[in-house]
């Protein structure tokens, strides 16, 4: 299996910020033993400082990876190099002081801007998927339309929306579930677009169109505000170039 490698966007003695490619799993697990993960990449190239760390801590177990991205979602991801920085950054995420921006392409013509505020939880009948359920956790997403696009290939014709997304909470699959809930699923989403829609989408794009494009946070040592940008992957820009503007 071909190995994937992230791009380094920022690197100093306290933190590492990476641009994760689509298709790369973030954390090691029992199901990823034969797969080269982003955590393996960190261990091989940027080993964390374990001198003063508890070997059973989340910092040690996760090799300093502060947050996660889905396997098929590309984009910016922060790694802490020591336990103190890890705790600082996790606290920022918990306090919702970290600002995240995603770029997504969704099916349909979305309203120019809005918000989605419905609870998300793991589906009891399918543990691999999440959905909007009454006893789920609070989940809040805001969005703003960037551009409307037209897919027109043979008998396939549909308006799509390129949208900037601002998740205010960090639930698993949050953006994907929220847009599916309002009937504007992410283009190419194998889990949430529906079988027929996904079967058509994958003729044009072999991943879902969701990219973590920007993150703003406070550096754990300097206390300076940092904004790190991950450019839209070439595969996504090339697909956009095949679409007409509306």
Image (spheres, rainbow, N blue to C red):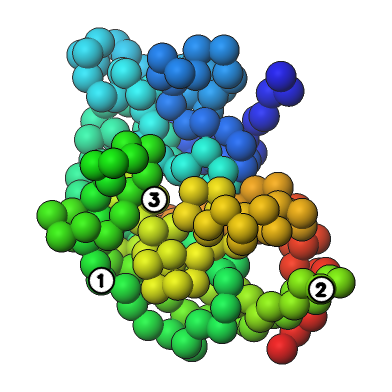
Q: Decide which of 159, 231 is in the foreground and name it.
A: 159
Mark 2 or 1: the one toward you: 2
Q: Decide which of 45, 195 is in the foreground and name it.
A: 195
Residue at x 35%, y 24% (from the top left corner): 62
Residue 117 disc label: 1
Q: Which residue is mark 3?
A: 173
Q: Residues within 10 Å of mark 1 (few under 14, many from 20)?
A: some
Q: How many marks?
A: 3
Residue 149 sits above or below residue 89 on the image: below
Dot 1 or dot 3, earlier in sequence? 1
Residue at x 37%, y 44% (from the top left corner): 129
Residue 72 location in percent, x, y? 56, 43
**Distance from Cα at disc 2 to Cα at disc 3:** 31 Å
Q: Which residue is mark 2?
A: 155
Q: Residues within 10 Å of mark 3 (few under 14, many from 20)?
A: some
Question: On the rendered image, what quadrant is the C terminus found in?
Answer: bottom right
Which of the 4 image quarters holds residue 141? bottom left
Residue at x 58%, y 18% (from the top left corner): 35
Q: Is residue 3 left or right of residue 130?
A: right
- Element under label 3? loop
**Distance from Cα at disc 2 to Cα at disc 1:** 35 Å
Residue 77 sits above or below residue 84 on the image: below
Q: Is residue 94 left or right of residue 31?
A: left
Residue 134 visible in the shown view: yes
Residue 160 sits above or below residue 124 on the image: below
């Amino acid at each position: 299996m071909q190995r994937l490698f992230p791009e380094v966007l920022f690197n100093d003695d306290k933190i590492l910020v990476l641009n994760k490619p689509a298709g790369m799993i973030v954390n090691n697990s029992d199901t990823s033993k034969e797969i080269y993960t982003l955590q393996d990449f960190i261990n091989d190239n940027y080993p964390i400082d374990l001198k003063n760390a508890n070997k059973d801590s989340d910092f040690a177990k996760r090799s300093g990876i502060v947050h996660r991205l889905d396997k098929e979602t590309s984009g910016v991801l922060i790694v802490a190099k020591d336990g103190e920085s890890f705790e600082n950054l996790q606290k920022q995420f918990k306090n919702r002081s970290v600002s995240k921006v995603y770029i997504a392409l969704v099916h349909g013509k979305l309203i120019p801007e809005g918000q989605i505020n419905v609870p998300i939880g793991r589906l009891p009948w399918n543990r691999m998927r999440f959905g909007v359920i009454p006893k789920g956790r609070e989940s809040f997403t805001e969005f703003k339309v960037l551009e409307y696009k037209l897919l027109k290939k043979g008998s396939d014709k549909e308006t799509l929306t390129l949208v900037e997304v601002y998740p205010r909470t960090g639930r698993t699959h949050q953006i994907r579930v929220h847009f599916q809930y309002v009937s504007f699923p992410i283009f190419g989403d194998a889990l949430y677009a529906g079988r027929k829609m996904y079967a058509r989408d994958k003729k044009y794009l072999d991943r879902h169109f969701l990219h973590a494009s920007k993150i703003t946070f406070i550096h754990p040592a300097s206390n300076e505000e940092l904004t790190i940008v991950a450019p839209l992957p070439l595969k996504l820009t090339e697909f956009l170039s095949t679409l007409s503007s509306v």
